[in-house]
Amino acid sequence: MESIEPILIKTHKAAAALRKAADNQIVKALEMLADAVEANTAAIIEANSLDVSKQDANASKTDRLRLNEQRIKNIADSIRQVSKLPNPTGRIIENRTLYNGLLLEKIAVPLGVVGAIFESRPNVTFDIATLCLRSMNGCLLKGSSEAENSNKIAVEIIKSVLKENNIDENCVTLLPSSRETVEQLYTATKYVDVLIPRGSESLIQSVRKNSLVPVIETGAGVCHIYIEKEADIDKAVNIVVNAKVSRPSVCNAVDSILVDSMAAPEFLKKLQPFFQKNAVEIFADEAAYKLLKNYSYLHRATSDDFAREFISLKCAIKVVKDIDEALEHIEQYSTKHSESIISENKDQCEHFLQEVDAAVVYANASTRFTDGEEFGLGAEIGISTQKLHARGPFALEKLVTEKWIIRGEGQVRE
């Protein structure tokens, strides 16, 4: 197994140099990168097609892998949005004089070198590199073999722009896609400051269990929408269809629909044609199964189905007697990503918003809004479901840590 230590050393040194770069230099590089992405659309699609051609065309992960002109334009627009955001480093968090005359400052500084381990999403390559550059962090990108050609051309474009702007190209590094690379990253505490896994639950758990480098999780989503008995049914149907169908392969798509028994007959009747049109497979509990008995893509649910992140045109449906049962179900099965209630009863909405423990909780809105760009944060590295350091969209503002600076005039401690 070839050592990646020489690569890590180069990125570590480049990250130190990046911290000395002028802010306008980085902004200009990002603006040029956005233009370069659009200018290389045809080449990116050609490389991406090589990756897509090796995959099952109907698999949900293939949709995440696939790039087209619109998705590439969205990548470029996202880079421009990040370039316009203020540099999160150098901000003075606290400033005061101690009793003995020492001048104390706490400032925001870059994390250093961010290692990202992610699966077949080539847009993530651009997202992470852009966020790290804007926050003056070096980054090590370990993508999956499924996206190897897409990731290679992405990093080639990034490095070309960095060189043109006199920024050390080694501050953005694409690592070999082998499993052995990950094993070496786990122990690279001298060169890597934090590891961020983005992908399946099994990937996240593997990194968490094996890494000696500190880990920030971006969690899998088992997202719920609860249709309360006083819901506007047409509004509820529209929200649920959007949350399931608009892009089923992403982590903020709804996985389980909980519907109050009072609302279930009308809601499921109105939902059925929309799900039928999109061939959504439903895994239903006994009460929902009886109401949907003529539906074409119907299965009886097991308890495991309510714990599944489907990332496809599949969802679980359960009829509940009231909000308390809905809350109990969410507490049992939620991965604490995104949860929503649909109701015209403001008290019930507020009760839900306060009681549910998740990174993002909604009233009368689709879970699909859980996204750094939608929140005005620019691109995100992922959606964090843990409670330390970052929670929710893990974006530019969280790619920093703190540093204490003390200025004295000869003070000693008694």
Image (cartoon, rainbow, N blue to C red):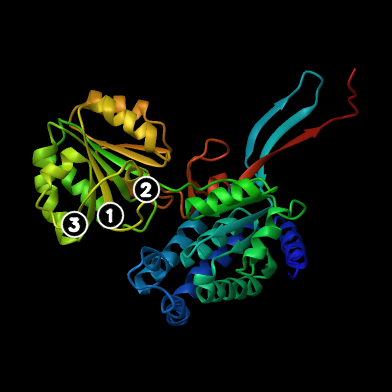
Whichever of callouts 3 and 1 sits on the residue coming sooner in the sequence is 3
Write down the residue under mark 2.
308
Write down the residue under mark 1.
314
Mark 3–mark 1 CB contact (< 8 Å): no
Instruction: Using the image, determine if residue 31 lies above or below residue 91.
Output: below
Judging depth in this view, the residue of 191 and 304 nearest the camera is 304
At label 3, which amino acid type do we have?
Tyr
Write down the residue under mark 3.
297
Judging depth in this view, the residue of 157 and 348 nearest the camera is 348
Whole-percent x, y for residue 208 in the image: 60, 46
Q: Quadrant of the N terminus?
A: bottom right
Q: Between marks 3 and 1, how big is the CA–CA gap?
A: 9 Å
At label 2, which amino acid type do we have?
Arg
Whole-percent x, y for residue 5 in the image: 76, 64
- Residue at 39% of width from left, 68% of height from top? 62
Instruction: Using the image, determine if residue 241 lies above or below residue 325.
Output: below
> Which image quarter: residue 157?
bottom right
Secondary structure beneath dot 1 equals strand
Secondary structure beneath dot 2 equals loop
Residue 342 shows in this picture: yes
At label 1, which amino acid type do we have?
Lys
- Residue at 9% of width from left, 39% of height from top? 265
